[in-house]
Amino acid sequence: MDDNVLVQVQNLKMYFQTEGSYSFTKKYIKAVDDVSFELFKGETFGLVGESGCGKSTLGRTMLGLYKPNAGRVIFEGEDIFALKNKSMKEMRKKMQLIFQDPSASLNPRKTIADILNEPFHIHKVGTKLERKAKINDLLDKVGLSAYHLSRYPHEMSGGQKQRVGIARALALNPKLIICDEPVSALDVSIQAQVINLLEDLQKEYDLTYLFISHNLSVVHHICDRVGVMYLGKLVETGNHEDIYRNTLHPYAKALISAIPHTDPDNSIERILLKGDVPSPANPPTGCRFHTRCLQATDLCAQVEPPLKEVFAGHFAACHQV
Ligand code: ADP
Ligand code: MG
């Protein structure tokens, strides 16, 4: 495996069973359906797509929080689903999650000190004194202070709570952090501060980020590479420049055209998609996007286009490119 690769996701499928306990009545929501990509060490990979397209499920499956129906996640050369319990626990230290809603992800009955002590407690790391020193250091790194240790989450602002969530994710020196819409629940004025903090921490701790967002303009500023998801599938991946300046997939084009522009010389015409996102329980045949695509042909309705490398490092799943 390439030394620069931290994580390889190979043909990952994660289906949720929805009804029926007999095989003939079973139905599946194909939340993640045959997704492959890799994360390079130290990069920020932006994962974007409309709500419900499977971004959170992909992120959670990559952390081993769901057992996939098929496929593999290779972290530093190790297949995480082949690990025994003890090795999996070690692996968990290296991969952390920051949630969208800091209010829901912090236990309201615990103080910030207790919340930040938890990772050390669960993984039996450090003495009491060492933990205390590390927690103070973490608070400092995320822009909070010892004053906050005895506070409860409800006594803090949304931005402060998200800083606690970030400190908790950093506690065990992870290599990968999956940031699942980390600023979507925050006021616009606070969003930039939290994003700047994440960028500073990435440099300081050599972190790799999978940054999930339904908002392409948020991802625009911080990502090295971007993957666009539609109905459980990756439809385009590439470098930041590739995705924003030489967009290939009609769905990605539509998403990008919806970003508000301040530069009047650089305005692109807004592409409005027809119809709604189909249900992942019953996705369209062929290309899943063909029911909403203005360029779709008969072929698109019948044959699923593979994700192919159109330019070096720039992949798209579309019969028209
Ligand atoms: P996103 O994060 O892109 O909004 P999700 O990964 O949360 O999308 O959801 C993808 C699809 O899987 C949705 O249709 C959602 O309803 C479904 N889903 C997500 N989690 C579960 C679950 N635990 N059980 C059943 N269905 C789920
Ligand atoms: Mg989500």
Image: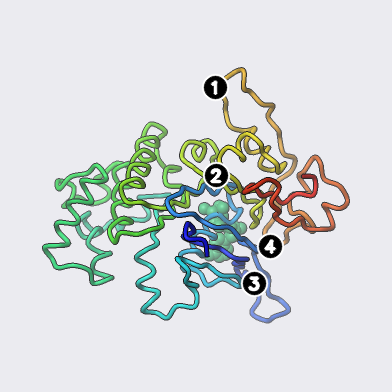
Q: Position of residue 280 (x, y in %)?
A: 67, 59
Kindly identify the residue that appears in the image at 58 percent across and 32 percent down.
Answer: 259
Instruction: Tell me the SS state at disc 3.
Output: loop
Q: Are marks 3 and 2 in contact (CB under 8 Å)?
A: no
Point out which mark residue 281 bears: 4
First along the sequence among labels 1 and 4: 1
Which quarter of the figure is the C terminus placed in?
top right
Mark 1 to mark 3 CA distance (whole Å): 47 Å
Mark 3 or mark 4, which is nearer to you? 4
Q: Nearer the viewer, residue 244 or 115?
A: 244
Measure the C-alpha gap from mark 3 to mark 4. Answer: 11 Å
Measured in 3D between alpha carbons, the distance from the residue under mark 1 to the one under mark 4, in whole angstroms, is 39 Å
The answer to whether the beta carbon of the residue marked 2 is less than 8 Å from any atom of ligand 1 is yes
Q: Which residue is mark 3?
A: 19
**Mark 1 sits on what residue?**
262
Residue designated by label 2: 214
Viewer-nearest of discs 1 and 4: 1
Q: Which amino acid does the dot numbered 3 rest on?
A: Glu
- As drawn, the residue found furthest toward the right would be 298
Residue at horizontal 62 percent and vertical 49 percent from the top: 313
Q: Secondary structure at mark 4?
A: loop
Res. 53 visible in picture: yes
- Under mark 1, the amino acid is Thr
Residue at the spot 68% in from the left edge and 74% down from the top edge: 26
Residue 159 spot, x, y in % from top left: 33, 41
Q: Foreground mark, 2 or 4?
A: 2
CB at mark 4 closer than 8 A to ligand 1?
yes
